[in-house]
Image: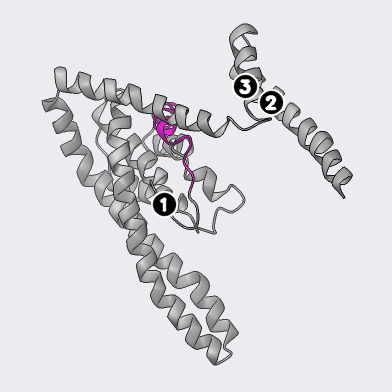
Amino acid sequence: MQIHLWQAILIGVVYYLGQMGTPWVSLAGTHTIMRPLVNGALVGLILGDPVQGAIYGAAIQLPFIAWIGAGGAVPMDTALAGTLGTTFGMAAGVSPSVAITLAVPISLIGTMIWVLHMTVDITFVHMADSAAEKGNLNRINLLHVWPPQITMFIFSVVPAMLAAFYGSGPVKAIIGDLNGTPLHVLTVIGGILPALGIAMNLRAMTNKGVLIFFLLGFMIAVYSKLAILAIAVFSVIIAYIYTTLFLKNNAEGKV
């Protein structure tokens, strides 16, 4: 699959919208677009096959399913992993498992971009401090939004665009050279990484009162043979009842 320049630019924009601190998609939620499942589908839409993009994005999502950024620290860049992982996977025509092995190191490169972007933003903080000393509220508001967003746009769109436009060809060639046992090894590794992500997520579910809901969902999925959409609807209903009745009553009882 050949990626055109306009497609590469749009892929870069998708990566930008998935960055933490991007205010333009607050209704949809930055933490939604940064998920590989979502940005993978958007990349697939740009490349002409949103279903295939969602398949790649869902596979890439699994190793990062327990991802969390605390205190501004970004251990892995899930947005870059989803956008470029899906891009390279679709361009090279490899299986989703191989796309996972491509996405994980890409996510680590994304952390470098994030650190560089935040380092540059320190300049705007000092400029805002100077404006605060002068009581210039309008300048503070300007420095709070526009310079950091312009910087983030440049640091996000440009690298992702260049990687998508110039990198898809070399990646496809490398995958072709690895055909056979090396590619099989990558596929096996790609199958292990989702299990690691799920294991990390299960570890977070071992708290009292949480694991029971996971077991309930697992039993329903295995023995009821319901579609995942129906199970999701039941889950939303159970979560609503639990949060509005049980937790609310407990909170009122403590007061």
Tell me the mark number nearer the camera, choosing from 2 and 3.
2
- Secondary element type, mark 2: helix
User: Mark 1 is on which residue type?
Assistant: Val
Element carrying mark 1: loop
* Rendered image: mark on residue 228: none
Q: What residue is pinned by disc 1? A: 74
- Looking at the rendered structure, the kind of residue marked 3 is Leu
Name the residue tied to disc 3. Answer: 229
Q: Magenta region, mostly helix, strand or loop?
A: helix
Of callouts 1 and 3, which one flags the residue occurring earlier in the amino acid sequence? 1
Cα distance in 3D space between marks 2 and 3: 10 Å
Gap between marks 2 and 1, in whole Å?
A: 30 Å
Please give left or right for residue 191 compared with residue 37 in the image: left
**Residue at left offset 40%, top offset 62%:** 152
Q: How far apart are marks 1 and 3 (CA)?
A: 31 Å
Mark 2 touching mark 3, by CB under 8 A?
Answer: no
Density class for disc 3 (Cα within 10 Å; few <14, some 14-19, many ≥20) is few
**Amino acid type, residue under disc 2 in the picture:** Ser
Tag of residue 235: 2
Instruction: Judge whether 108 appears above or below 96 on screen.
Output: below
* Magenta-drawn segment: 50-68
Mark whose residue sits in front, 1 or 3: 1
